[in-house]
Amino acid sequence: GDKRHNTGGFLIQSAFQATGISSSLWLYGAATNLLMLRLAAELGYVVNAPFMSWLKASCVPALTAMALTPLVAFTAMPPKVKVTPEAPKAADRKLKEMGPMSADEVILVAVIAGMLVLWAGSSTFGIPAVHTAVLGLSALLVTGVLRWSDCVREEGAWTTMTWFAILVSMSALLNKHGVVRWLAAELALKINALGLFGGQAFMVLLLIYVFLHYVFASQAAQISALYLPFVAMMVDTGTPPLAAVFALAFASNLFGSITPYSSAQAPVFFGGGYVSLKDWYRLGFIFIVFNIAVWVSVGALWWKVIG
C-alpha cells in the first residue's frame, strides 16, 4: 500500500526530528559542536568545562522538546494505526533472538562509560577531551574490539577531520586579520540603527541564522560561513557572549531537520519514502517553529535559573 500518511511516516518524523534535539543535548552529539566551540574561542569566548557547561545549558530545553516531539508529530502527521498491543511482545521476541551481550559489546559499553566520565570531569582531572578520545580508541584497539583496518575504512570520519581542520584554520586567519570583527561591527551598527538592541536584536539574528539554512546543503557549510559573524553580531548588539555562543550552537543542530538536504542524516530518512517532499517541508517548518518556541521560552527561563 501507499507508505505515505501512515504509521511509518509518523515514526520516521518522530525519529528524524529527535536527531537534531539529541545532538544539541550533548557536546559530543555532533562533530560540529566541538567545531563551534573552537570557533567561538577564536573570538575570545572560551567555554570552561565544555562538556558540563554544554549539558547544563541544554538539558532542560532539549529534554522538554524531546518529550513533546512525538506529540507534535502525532498532531502534524497522525498515524493510521494508533494502538499496537503486539509491539511489546514483538520487541521481547527480537531481544531474545539477539541473545546476551557479547564480550566486545560489554567492553565497548565500559569504554564509552569511562570516556563520558573523563569528558564530564575534564576540568577536574586535567585531561583534555582529545586525550580522552585517543585513550578510548586505544583501549578499543588493544582489546580487539576494533582493528586498525576498521578505522581506515571510515572514510567519512577522515574526510570530516580534514575539512574541519581546514575550516578552523581559515576561520582563525579571518579572525586574525580582523575580517570577522569588522563585518560584525558594520552589520551590528545597521541593526542598532533600526532601533533593535538586546533581546529584539537577538531574536532577529537568531531567526535569520536559522532560516538561512534553507539555502545551505549542510550544517558544516553554514557554520563555517556564518557562525562566527553571527556570534559577534549578537554580542555587539547586547547579547551576553556565552548566550550567543550556545544559542547559535543549539540552533545549528536544530535546523538540520528542516529540509531533505539540511543535514547528513536527512537524505537517509527521506529516502525511505514514508513522507512526501511537500509534507517534509511542511513538517520541517512546523518543527523548527516548535523548537524555537521551546528553546527560547523554556531555555530562557532555565538559563536565568542557572545564571
Image: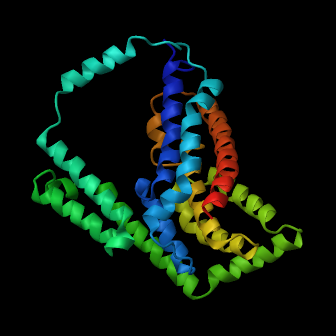
Q: Where is residue 215 in the image (x, y as percent from the top left)?
A: 63, 53
Q: Position of residue 41 (x, y in %)?
A: 52, 77
Say which residue appears at 69% left-offset and 73% top-offset.
235
Figure quadrant of the C terminus: bottom right
Say which residue appears at 57% left-offset and 82% top-offset.
175
Q: Which of 243 and 4 is in front in this view?
A: 243
Say which residue appears at 21% left-offset and 22% top-offset.
96
Q: Position of residue 155 (x, y in %)?
A: 29, 56
Say which residue appears at 52% left-offset and 25% top-offset.
9
- From the viewer's perspective, is residue 280 above or below residue 35? above
Q: Is residue 247 left or right of residue 12?
A: right
- Indicate how the structure is coloured in the image: rainbow
Q: Is residue 148 visible?
A: no
Quarter-wise, where is residue 305 in the image? bottom right
- From the viewer's perspective, is residue 124 above or below residue 63? below
Q: Can residue 144 be seen in this view?
A: yes
Q: Position of residue 50 (x, y in %)?
A: 46, 67
Q: Nearer the viewer, residue 135 or 150?
A: 135
- From the viewer's perspective, is residue 306 above or below residue 74? below
